[in-house]
Image (cartoon, grey):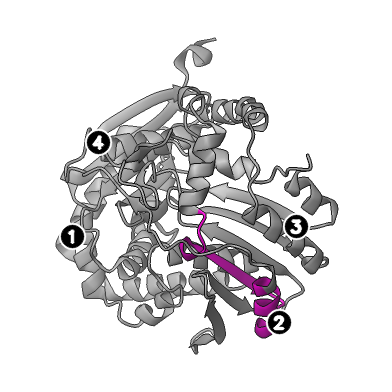
């Protein structure tokens, strides 16, 4: 067992890798809560690969990772594991992202009883023509729901402006047309290719004794390692953006805007960049910033804009989101403020205040077991140890943040996505 201790937040992460290649991580917390998440490094972007031992490329329909997530709960006896877990008082769920799929539950009681069901359904898929077809209508409804969700349309439109060929453009749920091509055979092939112990991680956070938890999980593992590797294939992406601006009318009362900046340097230190961008967000858009005060007093924004650095192994970009009744003027003022800050440099006191706030927010994430576990999973599949954020913090200087500002906030790599109110409805 490996133990990684972070003295800054006084937390210990216990790590063990089983003989079959499955990695288990446990971060104990003094709380009544218990949280477990089992995740595989397979998401919406993984649509082309060479299956273990095969030389012919497999191409799967968009949305298949999400489809499999839905189907894994169904068992051969006709029962649904999600219903069973809920019936014994645990909060169970699952989710699919661009690069991983995760199954989880949280509880204060009945953890061991729930663990039996949890470990069983993840390791024993049961797909039939009938149950795969039955799910199709449910997922079609989910796709329709997302189509009507303004923030999702805002995000996907921004991705289409930033990237021409990158798989980030694939909608996680797929489309009605793509999910119509999903069969039980394709689901089994996905499961056999990616739901492999060496491609998975289990993370626990909460009221656990590490040795006991490791033993419980180990006793329930039936997965075997596969000596053959699954080889993924991704599209090559241009460094240029596709288009600068996109706009869509939807049922919203106030226009929502997403400004995106494409980062083509996928080999840089992502942790340091992530911290620097959070600091820049506080300096530029925090409630004590001059820009926020100016835009707020002019009635152009009503809440603090959010900023996020989203990255994986195949893409990276900055996203700034806000609502405004004056889209062009507000985007222009934000762009001007960013470019002015590049020229003048960052005020040292502003930098120090922003750095303290970002550090405080990072520490707060370690108060909630769900944030801890899902954060560890997301970082793991990016080849990051979550404790790295605390270790890197002391090395973040004003000069480094200014360097990130100059290199990443580049007008030629900027896109603007807007969701605006439906004009016809407003006329009525």
Which residue is the extreme one toward the top?
428
Residue 346 visible in the snapshot = no
Residue bearing the label numbered 1: 406
| Rendered location of residue 277, percent (x, y) | 33, 62
Asked whether, in this view, residue 402 is left or right of residue 330, the answer is left
Q: Is residue 352 magenta?
A: no
Measured Cα–Cα span from mark 4 to mark 3: 42 Å
Measured Cα–Cα span from mark 4 to mark 2: 49 Å
Measured Cα–Cα span from mark 1 to mark 4: 24 Å
Q: Which mark is nearer the camera, 4 or 2?
A: 2
Q: Which mark is residue 225?
A: none
Quadrant housing residue 327: top left
Assign a secondary structure to mark 2: helix
| Rendered location of residue 50, percent (x, y) | 34, 47
Residue bearing the label numbered 3: 117
Measured Cα–Cα span from mark 3 to mark 1: 51 Å
Residue bearing the label numbered 2: 212
Assign a secondary structure to mark 3: helix
Measured Cα–Cα span from mark 1 to mark 2: 50 Å
């Amino acid at each position: 067992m490996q133990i990684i201790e972070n003295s800054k937040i006084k937390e210990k992460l216990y790590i063990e890798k089983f003989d079959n290649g499955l990695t288990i991580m446990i971060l104990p917390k003094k709380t009544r809560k218990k949280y477990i998440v089992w995740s595989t490094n397979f998401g919406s972007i993984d649509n082309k690969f060479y299956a273990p031992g095969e030389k012919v490329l497999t191409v799967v329909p968009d949305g298949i990772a999400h489809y499999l997530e839905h189907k894994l709960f169904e068992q051969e006896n006709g029962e649904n594991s999600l219903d069973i877990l809920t019936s014994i008082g645990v909060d169970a769920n699952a989710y699919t992202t661009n690069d991983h799929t995760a199954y989880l539950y949280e509880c204060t009681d009945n953890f061991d009883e729930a663990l039996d069901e949890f470990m069983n359904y993840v390791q024993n898929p049961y797909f039939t023509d009938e149950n795969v077809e039955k799910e199709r209508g449910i997922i079609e409804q989910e796709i329709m729901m997302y189509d009507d969700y303004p923030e999702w349309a805002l995000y996907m439109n921004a991705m289409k402006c930033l990237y021409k060929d990158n798989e980030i453009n694939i909608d996680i749920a797929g489309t009605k047309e793509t999910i119509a091509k999903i069969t039980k055979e394709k689901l089994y092939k996905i499961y056999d290719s990616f739901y492999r112990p060496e491609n998975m991680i289990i993370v626990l956070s909460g009221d656990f004794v590490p040795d006991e938890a490791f033993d419980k999980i180990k006793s329930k593992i039936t997965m075997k390692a596969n000596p053959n590797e699954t080889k993924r294939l991704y599209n090559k992406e241009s460094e240029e953006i596709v288009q600068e601006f996109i706009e869509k009318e939807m049922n919203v009362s106030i226009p929502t805007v997403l400004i995106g900046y494409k980062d083509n340097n996928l080999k840089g230190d992502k942790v340091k960049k992530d911290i620097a961008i959070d600091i820049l967000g506080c300096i530029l858009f925090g409630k004590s910033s001059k820009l926020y005060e100016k835009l707020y007093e002019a009635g152009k924004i009503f809440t603090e804009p959010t900023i996020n650095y989203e990255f994986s192994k195949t893409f990276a970009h900055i996203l700034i989101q806000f609502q405004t009744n004056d889209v062009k003027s507000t985007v222009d003022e934000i762009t001007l403020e960013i470019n002015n800050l590049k020229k003048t440099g960052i005020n040292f006191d502003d930098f120090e205040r922003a750095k303290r706030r970002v550090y405080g927010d990072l520490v707060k994430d370690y108060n909630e077991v769900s944030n801890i576990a899902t954060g560890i999973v997301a970082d793991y599949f990016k080849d990051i140890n979550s404790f790295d954020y605390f270790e890197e913090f002391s090395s973040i200087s004003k000069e480094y943040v200014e360097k990130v500002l100059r290199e990443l906030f580049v007008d030629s790599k900027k896109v603007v996505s807007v969701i605006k109110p439906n004009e016809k409805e407003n006329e009525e």
